[in-house]
Every structure is written in C-alpha cells, then in structure tokens.
Amino acid sequence: MNPLTTAFDELAPLHRPVMVLALRGLFDIAEVATDAVEALMAERAAPAVASIDPDPFFDFTQERPVVQFVDPDDPDDDAEREIAWPENEFRVVRHHGLSHDLVVLVGVEPHLRYATFADCIINVASELGCEIVVTLGAAPEQVPHTRPPRVVGSTTNEGLARALGLSRPQYQGVTGLVGVLQARLDDAGIPAVSLRVGVPYYLGNAKHPQSSAALLRHLEHVLGVPTGHAAFDEEVARWRSLHDEAVADDDEASAWVEQLEHEHDRRLEAEMPSADDLAAELERFLREQRDE
C-alpha cells in the first residue's frame, strides 16, 4: 500500500515552487522550527495537496493519537468525537507576482522507516517541480537570549555551497529524518538547503518565538516571499520579558549570560553571508539550473 496520498490532478501549475518543511522532533527544540513554518500558512489559503499515512511510520506508544470533540465548543453528552493522528500534510501557498510559490510541510518526525518517509517527500517535490527544498530546524546552543538569534545554513550540493558560501554538513553522530532526507535529496539530484537557528540552551524547552521569527526573516529575504514573521512580534516581547526575569533572579545565570554576550559579539565577524547576498546568489544558481 502506498503511504502517500496525492491530489495533484486538479492543481493549477505552480510558479517556480520551493518546498519548505519542518518536523517536530529531534531538531526542533521548543517547536521553534514548526512554529515558524505554521506561520507561513497563517491567514493564507493553503489547500492540502498530499498527505502521508501515519500508520507505517509511528510508534503510537510514543506519539499517541488524541481523542477530541469535532466541535470543541460543544462537548456535551451527544457531541461527536474523532481520533486525531500524527499529521503530515503538504500544503500549497501561492504568491502571485512574486518569485516563488511554496509547497509547505509541517508535521511530525516519524519513528520508523525513515527512507520510505523521505521518499514520500521527494516524490511530492518531484511531481510538483520544486526547484529546491529548504528544511528548517532549531537546536540548543550556547547563545544569549539577549542577542538576535543567528541562522546558519548548510548543503550537500556543491554548486549551492559555492554559490551561497554555505558549509557542507560537518556533523557526525545520530541523526533524524532531516539528515536522511538531505542525503536522499542529493542522490535524487534535487538541491536542498538546511537552515538552523540556535536557541539558548539554558532556557530548556521554553518557547523562544524570537528564534522562529529569525528563521522566517532569513527565509523571506532569500526567497523573496512574505513569511509572516511580524506575527511573532507580540510573543517575542512577552517571552523576552519572561526570560529576562528568570535570569535576573539568578546571579550565576546573569554572569553566564554576560559571558555568552561577549562571545556572541566576537563571533559576529564570522557570520554567514547576509540574507540579501544569499537571495541574489540563490536566484542565479536556480537560473543556471534551469538553463542546464
């Protein structure tokens, strides 16, 4: 049985589509990346065009389905209930007159059959003609919450690495679905970029909307499409105040944050190229790919 269900037949052609995805799991600390990708679709028409059946890919003792009321405002004795399963749906966000339409996947990292799950994503990217796949992630790092989060990128594609000044992945160790997907995209000849934002490790799993907004700002500059990062402004201010209060109550934490600030400022000179530079180089790379 094919775990991928598609509805491409009646879909009007997309304009130079780019796939953007984030999966809740190993590389999504505090759900920073999935919150960012959810914002891409907020208040926009985003019809579902494909979905991945959860049954072959999840251990439901870890990612349990949820029983919920169909109408949460009417939980009486006769109210209809339903089972909500882990969801991985591909949605289309069109940007008429702009550089790219988006194919968006925000979902849950599977527990099983990584290769098959990755092939489902590649199938959708191929069928819809996605020019590039961008994965978003977030990881705990030794960075201060008082400075703008830094977004770093990497790619296994040599042409993209040269064009955008990105590093090739240097990580060795256990990986998640995104690591498997990057390798299989490379084998399939589909360019892919991984963007990752650092989240202050001392905040634990506390929300950090500032990092979600940083991912979206970078993506907006690079792709030339609106990402809705301003929707995080109010939450950024609220959580910044909460983080400041928590650190101020701990002298040791305050001293440690000062050290992180000093190190962060020193490393700014080695930051990746600006988003504006990346945007121009990305368009040049994609133009050359189409010419070839």
Image (spheres, grey):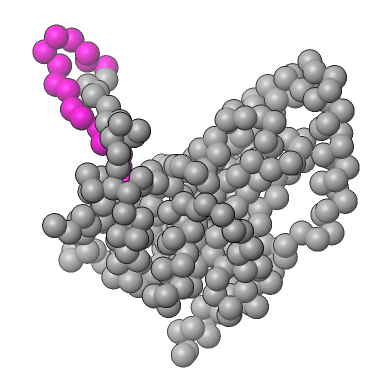
Residue sitting at x 52%, y 82%: 287
Establish if 160 lies above or below 120.
below
* 3 and 220: which is toward the camera: 3
Secondary structure mostly seen in the magenta stretch? loop
Residue 84 percent location from the top left of the image: 25, 32
Residue 258 percent location from the top left of the image: 86, 34
In this image, 72 relative to 93: left or right? left
Residue sitting at x 82%, y 39%: 260
Residue sitting at x 20%, y 30%: 83
Residue 235 percent location from the top left of the image: 59, 30
Residue sitting at x 26%, y 56%: 49
* 269 and 139: which is toward the camera: 139
Magenta stretch containing residue 84, yes or no? yes
In this image, 237 relative to 13: left or right? right
Which region of the structure is painted magenta? 73-88
Query: Residue 212 lies in what quarter of the image?
Result: top right
In this image, 211 relative to 68: left or right? right
The quarter of the rendered structure image containing the N terminus is bottom left
In this image, 233 relative to 12: left or right? right
Query: Residue 200 lies in what quarter of the image?
Result: top right
Residue 130 percent location from the top left of the image: 39, 69
Q: Is residue 93 visible?
A: no
